[in-house]
Image: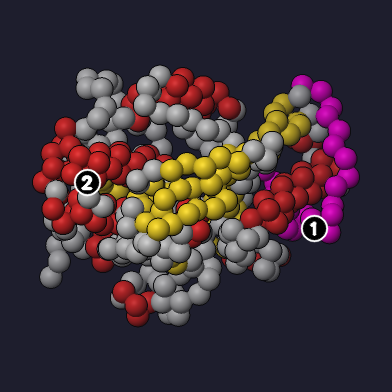
């Protein structure tokens, strides 16, 4: 519907993708340089939100702390946007949220479990090895995780499938989840290098990189005036406040059954089943809190069910959420209204902004990597 949404990513997005690749693949400096060139953006790196102040149902300030120095800052503003992934700002402000999977009966979602539970998608600790051109030793490393010829992973890199922590709390237990993800990488590699009988192909290889920041897929989801669900997407239900399009499949991860046989309750491998969708325009009402009046959200913490998160959570889609939130915020300022007020009174203005876009026009489409399959025809609802 709004073809200019997502165009902003042509200006700073990397031009090639892939999991567990060298740093230059992801062109982080290009992103930083682009951001530094934005005159109206002040960037405070390495600060973490630790508190908020409120007046009534509105946030008045967010308090942050530097993760190295401990320095604290207080940001006061009329509007805030929670793009933390974990829904941290909303949580601190008392916003309604969910975590885990809804039961099948709540929204009639065919993919949902029969009963609600606390399971989430996991976090990936990816890694890769390189050819050292000569013998490369690696220390004996076990730490309580025993690998053998039947349960080891005979691979030279760890893709997204190296995913763990589905049955733990992805916020409270996150350091434990990350540490276990690293532990199994090193333990498995140690087995391949030192104890596997036929390991000639590994003798000259060494670990080139192991992620020390785990890639998290799911934790809190902040609730908005609308909660996106499976039927909206699979039946292509139209909403008057349709905004950014989600095009990725419904891509939900769970424990790899083979890995579960060997590591029950402590799995570190995941599988998925891609359910293709037709491009779907997500309601703007999913992008602001239903009970914190001046809070937007963008990213994997928007107002969706666990099932619907399977499609909207990927990064170029979440980037479009940010564009819509920025446009809506400008209307909040222009008309002195809340995010909900934009929906109720200024939706046509928002549609105009989404149609125009905020990106430079005429740039080549350099964002053609990692594109998933899509349904060409809209679903026909009987």
Mark 2 highlights which residue? 336
Residue 213 position (above or below residue 135): below
Q: Quadrant of the N terminus?
A: top left
Question: Measured from the top left, where is residue 23 in percent x and y?
Answer: 58, 27
Question: Measured from the top left, where is residue 278 in percent x and y?
Answer: 24, 52
Question: Mark 1 or mark 2, which has the lower sequence index?
Answer: 1
> Does residue 313 appear anywhere in the picture?
no
Counting other residues with Cα less than 10 Å from the Cα at mark 1, is it few (<14), some (14-19), or many (20 or more)?
A: few
Magenta span includes 160: no
Mark 1 highlights which residue? 145
Question: Measured from the top left, where is residue 366 in percent x and y?
Answer: 34, 25
Residue 343 position (above or below residue 357): below
Residue lying furthest front: 55
User: Bounds of the magenta span?
Assistant: 133-158
Question: Measured from the top left, where is residue 38 in percent x and y?
Answer: 38, 23
In the picture, measured across the screen, residue 228 lies left or right of residue 12, that is: left
Taking the spot 52% from the left edge, 63% from the top edge, the residue there is 120
Of residue 35 and residue 319, the one placed in the foreground of this image is 35
Taking the spot 27% from the left edge, 63% from the top edge, the residue there is 226
Numbered disc in front, either 1 or 2: 2
In the picture, measured across the screen, residue 63 lies left or right of residue 16, that is: right
Magenta span includes 135: yes
Taking the spot 31% from the left edge, 74% from the top edge, the residue there is 107
Image quadrant where residue 199 sits: top right
Taking the spot 31% from the left edge, 30% from the top edge, the residue there is 8
């Amino acid at each position: 519907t709004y073809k200019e949404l997502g165009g902003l990513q042509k200006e700073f997005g990397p031009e090639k993708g892939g999991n567990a690749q060298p740093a230059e693949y992801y062109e982080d400096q290009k992103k930083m340089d682009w951001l530094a060139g934005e005159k109206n953006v002040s960037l405070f790196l390495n600060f973490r939100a630790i508190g908020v102040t409120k007046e009534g149902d509105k946030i008045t300030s967010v308090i942050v702390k530097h993760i190295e120095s401990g320095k604290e800052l207080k940001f006061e503003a009329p509007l805030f946007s929670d793009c933390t992934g974990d829904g941290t700002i909303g949580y601190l402000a008392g916003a309604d949220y969910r975590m885990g999977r809804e039961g099948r009966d709540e929204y009639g979602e065919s993919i949902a479990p029969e009963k609600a539970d606390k399971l989430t998608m996991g976090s990936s600790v990816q890694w890769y090895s390189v050819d050292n051109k000569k013998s490369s030793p690696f220390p004996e490393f076990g730490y309580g995780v025993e690998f053998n010829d039947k349960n080891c992973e005979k691979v030279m890199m760890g893709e997204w499938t190296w995913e763990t922590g589905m049955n733990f709390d992805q916020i409270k237990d996150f350091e434990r989840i990350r540490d276990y993800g690293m532990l199994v990488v090193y333990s498995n590699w140690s087995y391949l290098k030192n104890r596997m009988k036929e390991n000639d192909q590994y003798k000259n290889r060494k670990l080139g990189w192991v992620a020390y920041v785990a890639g998290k897929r799911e934790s809190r989801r902040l609730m908005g005036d609308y909660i996106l669900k499976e039927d909206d997407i699979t039946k292509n239900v139209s909403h008057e406040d349709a905004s950014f399009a989600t095009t990725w499949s419904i891509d939900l991860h769970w424990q790899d059954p083979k890995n579960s046989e060997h590591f029950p309750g402590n799995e570190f491998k995941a599988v998925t089943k891609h359910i293709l969708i037709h491009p779907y325009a997500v309601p703007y009402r999913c992008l602001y809190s239903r009970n914190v009046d001046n809070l937007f959200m963008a990213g994997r913490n928007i107002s969706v069910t666990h099932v619907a998160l399977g499609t909207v959570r990927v990064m170029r889609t979440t980037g479009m959420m940010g564009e819509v939130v920025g446009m809506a915020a400008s209307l909040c300022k222009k008309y002195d209204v809340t995010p909900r007020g934009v929906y109720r009174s200024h939706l046509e203005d928002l549609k105009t902004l989404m149609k125009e876009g905020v990106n430079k026009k005429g740039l080549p489409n350099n964002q053609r990597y990692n594109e998933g399959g899509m349904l060409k025809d809209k679903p026909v609802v009987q």
